[in-house]
Amino acid sequence: APPVLEISSLCVDYGVGEGAVRALHDVDLTLRRGEVLGLAGESGSGKSTLAYAVTRLLSPPGVITGGDVRYHPREGSPVDVLAMTPQQLRAFRWQEVSIVFQGAMNSLNPVHTVRAQLTDVLKAHRPQMSRAERVERARELLSLVGISPDRLGAYPHQLSGGMRQRVMIAMALALEPEIVIMDEPTTALDVVMQRQILRQLVRLREELGFSVVFITHDISLLIEFSDRIAIMYGGRIVEQAGAADIYRDPRHPYSDGLLHSFPALRGPRRELTGIPGSPPDLRSMPSGCAFHPRCPKAFDPCGRRTPRLAPVGTDTGRSVACWLNDDDHDRRSGEK
Ligand code: ATP
Ligand code: SF4
Ligand code: MG
């Protein structure tokens, strides 16, 4: 499928000058039309920073210090997201890209009904719709996410956590965006609920044709629902591949560690070993490969040189940033 969002060499810092820390390093990532892309990584790896940066919602002290984000509309030529005017951005968000944020179910306005919150989005962006049309559309949106339209008059506190989350998804879909980004929308919910909501989103994706970026640290959920997965560590993407390929054969030792941090969904049981140590501190990033102090396979070049994300062997669509996968190094050292 053709790309819908192309991110290249994206860099983000928090702060400027002396005190600045780099939260994203040269991130390259392509979202294709209609796919579900899973983004995984421990807390602090930069997942939300990436979501905020590509939608231009990053607020100070966050600054985009380099790179390129290109949006490909269904018709017309690609658009430079980083060069958009405030007016263009307003249209871009909601109509082209929408985000459901971490903990979003608590960001519904407690004093407004579901109807009011859904129709407000429509009112702001579709001024030509009549009141009756907006209410009709709100009913339609609720049904779409599996909530009875009878609940239109409900206040957030009258809904369960799962239903509030669905309302947030309904709002995100209100203007039929091409891309829906879900930033760990389900942390507060139990696993059964998380799976239900994801299943629903994937079904809606098939019906409506949008692309999904789904962000979580629970890689087992991603394996079940994503087409492709990108794994982040210390502000970099360290591996990117088809979900099944990563599950079967993770190439980056960190991907392997993440897979062993969550129970397998099906197939043979994995031993849960987790990853020893803790994620790096941005203010004192390890030299070379940032994962080297925790990596069971670290060897000679790892502490000195930073591996770049590069395609691996003949595996189409897979790229890895690890010296173990570097052919030149293999040739030099004769090891694999
Ligand atoms: P989580 O899984 O906990 O949501 P994440 O992968 O989304 O983590 P980010 O929130 O993107 O991680 O944070 C990436 C890094 O940037 C972290 O080290 C964080 O401390 C730092 N960071 C985030 N927001 C700010 C801020 N406003 N000011 C300074 N540093 C920040
Ligand atoms: Fe481990 Fe070295 Fe690969 Fe980093 S580059 S993941 S330290 S083997
Ligand atoms: Mg986050």
Image (cartoon, rainbow, N blue to C red):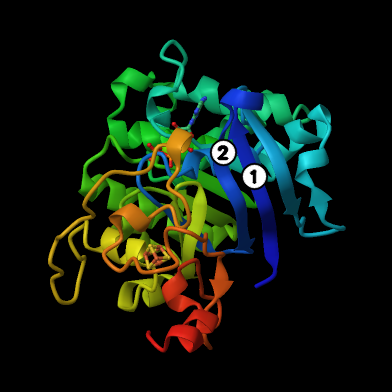
Q: Which residue occupies 15% across, 60% down?
A: 273
> Which is nearer the eye, 16 or 260?
16
Residue where numbered disc 1 is placed: 11
Left or right relative to 46: residue 310: right
SS category of the residue bearing label 2 = strand
Q: Nearer the viewer, residue 45 or 330?
A: 330
SS label for mark 1: strand
Contact flag, marks 1 and 2 (Cβ < 8 Å): yes
Task: Evaluate whether residue 178 shows in this view.
Answer: yes
Q: Residue furthest top?
A: 111
Q: Residue at x 38, y 21 (%)?
A: 154
Residue 14's quadrant in the figure?
top right
Q: Residue at x 76, y 34 (%)?
A: 89
Residue 22's tag is: 2
Query: Can residue 130 be seen at all in this image of the molecule?
Result: no
Q: Earlier in the sequence, mark 1 or mark 2?
A: 1
Residue 46: where, in percent of width, then height? 48, 42
